[in-house]
Image (cartoon, rainbow, N blue to C red):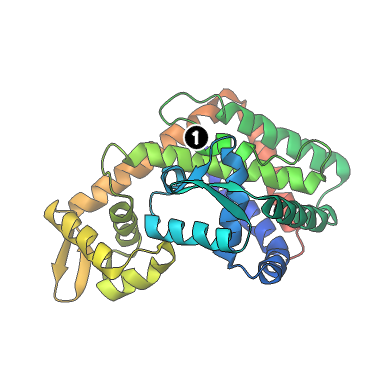
């Protein structure tokens, strides 16, 4: 089998499961008068305990997001009573925030727990296999390191949770380790997360207008001025060219990004080489059966 088939299978199943609980997430977002981004951020705060959450910590796993956006969201959560500010730009979960988080997680787990995609024995087998894969990723050396997957593991609902919730947790962990692998692959090449995000966008699209890039990456919260600075920096490095209003990735830029992707694959797939091929193939079959059984 091709080990590169693993991550697309994990990702497809994860996204399909996310679509199931999105209405629950939206319901609670409206209930607490928070944006979905704010609510997503709230759900990550406990993963940093006992360390207070900060922009610097959040930027480790997602350096593509503008620090100003993180700060804005954290302040929104303080205003909503979900967080307490405990120092300069440092925050902890409030009692109200903990109650809200428990309510949301219980609702999500109840929604997932009401679904059975496979016979019970097969679901147990799939959860066990995914946990074994995630456990092995947690033992990875540095690089790539295990920052993202370690923090994702802290959201494990426990063995008493519905089997669907367990499957979702381990898929989330396997996605988080992909983040670890990718961060390690490009940090030695480029230090600016927004610039790397732009390079990735052009690597996929080949060319784009400045305005289209701003729209596509708007969710990251970077202002056009910051995007212009990153574009200028990439142009100075010879990774993109500017012709009239069109930005194009150069052959050098493409090679840089392609190399980083190859390194990402190498880091990510290394832990899975410890497993017999026949077992990985069986896991892929179960994941696909599980995904097809989801009510979407």
Residue at 23%, 58% (x, y): give it: 230
Q: How crowded is mark 1: few (under 14 residues within 10 Å), some or many (20 or more)?
A: some
Q: Which quadrant of the figure has residue 227?
A: bottom left
On the rendered structure, is 251 left or right of 31? left
Residue at 58%, 46% (x, y): give it: 92
Tell me residue 110's x, y (percent).
82, 55
Residue at 21%, 68% (x, y): give it: 247
Q: Can residue 56 be seen in this view?
A: yes
Q: In which quarter of the image is the C terminus?
A: bottom right
Tell me residue 161's x, y (percent).
81, 43
On the rendered structure, is 105 left or right of 264? right
Secondary element at tag 1:
helix
Tell me residue 205's x, y (percent).
33, 65
Q: Name the residue under label 1.
A: 147
Q: For this rendering, which residue is in front, 30 or 290?
A: 30
Q: How many labels does the image show?
A: 1
On the rendered structure, is 16 left or right of 6? right
Residue at 38%, 59% (x, y): give it: 68
Residue 112 higher or lower than 76, as above or below? above
Residue 167 higher or lower than 40, as above or below? above
Q: Which quadrant of the figure has residue 263?
A: top left
On the rendered structure, is 204 left or right of 147? left
Q: For this rendering, which residue is in front, 283 or 246?
A: 246
Q: In which quarter of the image is the N terminus?
A: top right
Residue 4 higher or lower than 65, as above or below? above
Tell me residue 128's x, y (percent).
74, 33
Q: For this rendering, which residue is in front, 80 or 123?
A: 80
């Amino acid at each position: 089998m091709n080990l590169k088939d693993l991550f697309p299978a994990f990702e497809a199943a994860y996204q399909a499961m996310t679509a199931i609980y999105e209405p629950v997430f939206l319901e609670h977002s409206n209930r607490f008068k928070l944006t979905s981004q704010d609510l997503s951020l709230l759900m990550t705060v406990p993963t940093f305990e006992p360390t207070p959450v900060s922009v610097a910590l959040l930027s480790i796993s997602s350096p593509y997001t503008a620090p100003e956006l993180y700060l804005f969201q954290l302040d929104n959560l303080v205003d909503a009573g979900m967080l307490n500010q405990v120092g300069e730009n440092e925050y902890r979960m409030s009692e109200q925030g903990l109650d809200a988080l428990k309510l949301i997680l219980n609702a999500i787990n109840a929604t997932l727990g009401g679904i059975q995609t496979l016979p019970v024995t097969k679901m147990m087998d799939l959860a066990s296999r995914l946990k074994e894969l995630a456990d092995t990723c947690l033992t990875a050396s540095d690089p790539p390191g295990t920052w993202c997957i370690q923090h994702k593991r802290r959201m494990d609902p426990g063995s008493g949770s519905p089997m669907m919730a367990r499957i979702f947790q381990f898929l989330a962990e396997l996605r988080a380790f992909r983040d670890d692998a990718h961060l390690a692959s490009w940090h030695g090449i480029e230090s600016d997360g927004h610039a790397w995000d732009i390079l990735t966008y052009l690597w996929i699209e080949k060319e784009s207008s400045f305005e289209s890039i701003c729209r596509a990456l708007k969710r990251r919260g970077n202002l056009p001025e910051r995007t212009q600075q990153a574009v200028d920096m990439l142009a100075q490095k010879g990774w993109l060219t500017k012709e009239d209003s069109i930005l194009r990735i150069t052959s050098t830029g493409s090679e840089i990004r392609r190399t980083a992707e190859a390194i990402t694959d190498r880091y990510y797939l290394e832990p899975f080489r410890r497993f017999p091929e026949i077992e990985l193939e069986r896991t892929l079959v179960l994941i696909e059966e599980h995904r097809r059984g989801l009510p979407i």
